[in-house]
Amino acid sequence: MVLSTNFMYSQYTEVINSNRPGFSESPYSVGTGVYQLETSFFYRKSDIYPTFSRPQSQGIDFLFRTSFFKEQLELNVNLSVQKDDISFQNIFNSNYFTKGIGKFTIGAKYLVYEPKYKDKSKEIRSWVKRNSFDWKRLIPSVAPYVGINTNMVNDIYKKRGISPKVGILLQQEISYDFNIITNVYYDYIGTENPELSYIITATYNFSDRWSTFFENQTRFDKFQYQNSIGSGIAFLFNRNLQINNSLRLLTNPNSTGFYGSFGISYRFNRHLDKVNDLNKSDKPDMSYEEKRKGFFGRLYSKATNLFKKKGKRKSSSLKIESTQSINKNSVENLQNNSTVKQDESIRIRPKRTRVKPTKIKTNKPQDGKIQGNESKKGLFGIFKKKTKKEKKLEKIKDTEKGAEQLEREIKKLEREIKKDELKRKKEQKRLEKKTKKKKKEKNDE
């Protein structure tokens, strides 16, 4: 089920593009760098009819979708783990339960055709033309499907070995809120009981978050046909998470029943938009580094690039394309501009001239050294005699250091004198108190 049809012109969509809860499959891919898991918990109940039947089934259905090499190509794995009730009804009745894998299919689809529609919202000449129906919308998008049914399933579902599955996937964008998906499959090819089926799904979006669908599925084989009619609703919880449920009516020639499901779809988004050339007719030339790698080298670099961080992948993927676009645009501008000579380039690098160093050596002024034309002493300069200027400078420094030391000593003496005065004053006060006390005692006597 497609939630946001206004983004259908590209494979990658800003919000999750899930096929659940319907059984049909859209011809569009999820986009490169997207890893999407669609799950549904289902319960099926039907009547018991003569001989062997499966009146009850319950389990979990998984659909994993991703894309690697091209936006139009998608690889998917469909797997179901379920518990089935097997019933036998003849002269006597019996039943038993079995658990295992009910379906394990690996498939791929590729979008081969996508119609382009006119944006009638920009039509200002006529209200009728702006609101009239575009008959090109009846032309569907087309994608072939190829899959393999593995034999790693429960014994009740096993066929004779591995069998292929082929199909055609169609989607018609009737409007921005309404689309129709049609799938036609030919399954279990080469087995004793091949199956032909079709699915028609109509999807309508109420808003950006809520949508509903109505679906009809019919399957034919040598012995009988099976039909189901269902409907459901989906809610877009956030950009990468969808919640959905559905209810179906099963109408077979020998029995009737119902099918219910509740599902969650989530995608891990690692998609990066590619830089497309403005001139779509010309394909960008392969760089020298890519040519030197060869086919397997380029394939290995694409595989390892998936596990890099997003920022690193972006810089590495855009580096080659940006240089190619710059080179190409420079050539086109040279051809279109008659004033520029053919030998000249738009990006002119200035000539670099090497300046010879002068022979005059100057000493940089530094603290503790005298400026002038005096040569450096070198390693053994400590044994040379000091000049008058150097001796005079040392004397000045010594006098400055002596003055600073004298000031520090004076301040220290002043602090000590203050302390002594405070002590003397305290001692004098104590003696005065003592004498006063003695005089008072004598007077009392």
Image (tube, rainbow, N blue to C red):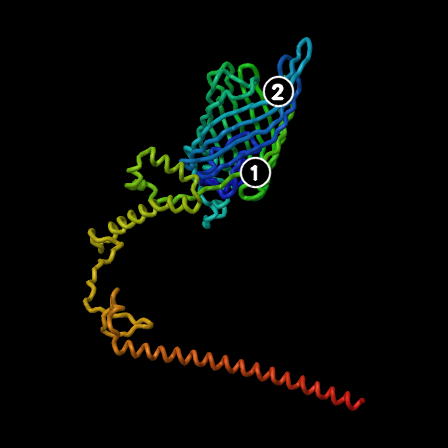
Q: How many marks?
A: 2
Residue 256: give x, y in percent of width and height: 65, 21
Neighbour tally class for label 1: few under 14, some 14-19, many 20 plus, Cα within 10 Å: many
Q: Is residue 366 left or right of residue 40?
A: left
Residue pointed to by mark 1: 204
> Mark 2 or mark 1: which is in front?
2
In front: 436, or 64? 436
Residue 323: give x, y in percent of width and height: 32, 47
Residue 421: give x, y in percent of width and height: 58, 84
Q: Is residue 411 left or right of residue 292?
A: right
Q: Is residue 303 above or below residue 338?
A: above
Q: Could you say which disc has been placed on residue 326 in the image?
A: none
Residue farthest bottom in this picture: 443
Q: Is residue 399 left or right of residue 152?
A: left
SS assignment at label 1: strand
Residue 202, quarter of the rendered image: top right
Residue pointed to by mark 2: 98
